[in-house]
Amino acid sequence: MNFSIVRFIVGWVLQFEAAFLLLPALVGVLYGERRPSLAFLAAAALCLIFGFLLRRKRPRQKELYTREGFASVALSWLVMSIFGALPFLFTGEIPNFVDALFETASGFTTTGASILPEVEGLSRASLFWRCFTHWIGGMGVFVFIMAILPLMGGGTTINLMRAESPGPSVGKLVPRVKDTAKILYEIYIGLTVVGTAVLCLCGLNLFDSLTTIFATVGTGGFGNYNDSVARFSPLVQNMITLFMILSGINYTAYFCLLRRQFKDAFSMEEVRAYLLIILGSVIAITWNIHKMYPTLPDSLRHAAFQVGSIITTTGFSSTDFDLWPQFSKTILVLLMLVGACAGSTGGGIKVSRLLILLKAMRKELSLMIHPRMVKRIKMDDHTLSHETLRSTNVFITVYFIILFASLLVIGIDNFDFTTNFTAVVATLNNIGPGLAMVGPTQNFSIFSPFSKCVLIFDMLAGRLELFPFLILLMPSCWKKH
């Protein structure tokens, strides 16, 4: 392990977080909130100091291999969550450190699970910070850093992007990693600006429009109100549905559209499967809940909103879907596991992995019938490498090991199975609300501090695709040579 490069990278992240913390401090000044503004300035100062100390001595060896890349990303996200929790402690709005860390980690990982019974009691600065953490974590802090400055020489920074970006495989859209990062953030910022403008035109004020779109394109789910977005007009809810679904699409499709490669964009198997899953789920749920709402359009709106919210792992709620029939709730739980597309800001297992598993299953069945047949697994007319197939199988195995282990451990709190299972699924897949005692009208404050730490681990591990955080637990990772 090259400890000097890991230390240097964590220092860079802290200094960028210091800059991020200045924005909620400015919001506090604009709304006349003196104490919150000072709290965020103090947290920014601490980030700046510690970041400077970690970066003071430049590393001699700048090579960044997979081990260093994964360890740097995992440690950076953990440290970023710890320092990001400080403003909640300084303001006294969340006086317990574990609760503050839970809220902040939930923000950065775009989970949206909250321990707050009264969101509306927070200052404007804190409300802005909660949603802004979604936006930072949605595309990834390292993608942001690489878009601005060359962190290291050579092409080794792709290991940082691989560790942070969701999906079974990560490649470069263009030859240089820095240019790829710029393209991704240009698309991300474009969705944010357009979404904010649309919500303003639909009647929301600028603050609500900005914070809501932060949580939407970042697929996070934190809201400024206790009822999430239920108080918003049907038009606003429909626009949020649209931008949630757009944010769950693989950004490679947008890149192809910008390059006018329309055939490549519309022929992506994953995107087609993603949209078909949404369409089928909306139709099934609308049919199942149509008697619960005054009109069919109301049923369709709530069905589309919740399907879009859950499959993209955003976690907004336009209604209490915990009151829906069991058939509809089962569909939503299955969508929690499916997740969005690879290369998007969404979480979950990812549609691409499920397609790969289905293709692999079909291949095995074909080989049983025709043992001598040579059959290759393809995605978008490209043959999948053995490494991709192996990593997909290992990911699914590790995913369910963590899921069941977490479910067993938090069972110590003695809550019902539905509560525990959906709490783990909602955090591991970065969704937010679950069912029963962690449903859309409830929160996660019921869990013990130990269980909250387990769920924090699930959130961070889920956001970073499991392996970067698991590597930290291996003794061989920390050997110097």
Image: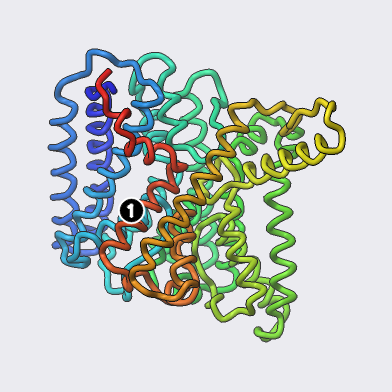
Residue at mark 1: 105
Work out whether residue 174 can be spotted.
yes
- Tell me if residue 281 comes above or below residue 298 in the rendering: above
Q: Hey, which quadrant is residue 150 in on the image?
A: top left
Image side of residue 284 versus residue 353, left or right: right
Front one among 227 and 331: 331
Secondary structure of the residue carrying numbered label 1: helix
Q: Position of residue 324 (x, y in %)?
A: 61, 79
Mark 1 belongs to which amino acid? Answer: Ala
Image quarter (top left, top right, bottom left or bottom right) of the C terminus: top left
Image side of residue 90 versus residue 327, left or right: left
Q: Residues within 10 Å of mark 1 (few under 14, many from 20)?
A: many
Work out whether residue 215 can be spotted.
no
Front one among 302 and 342: 342
Tag count: 1
- Tell me if residue 370 comes above or below residue 304 in the rendering: above
Q: Position of residue 345 (x, y in %)?
A: 51, 46
Q: Position of residue 76 (x, y in %)?
A: 30, 38
Q: Which residue corresponds to the image point at 34% horizontal and 16% vertical from the top-left?
A: 63
Q: How is the image coloured?
A: rainbow
Image quarter (top left, top right, bottom left or bottom right) of the N terminus: top left
Front one among 289 and 179: 289
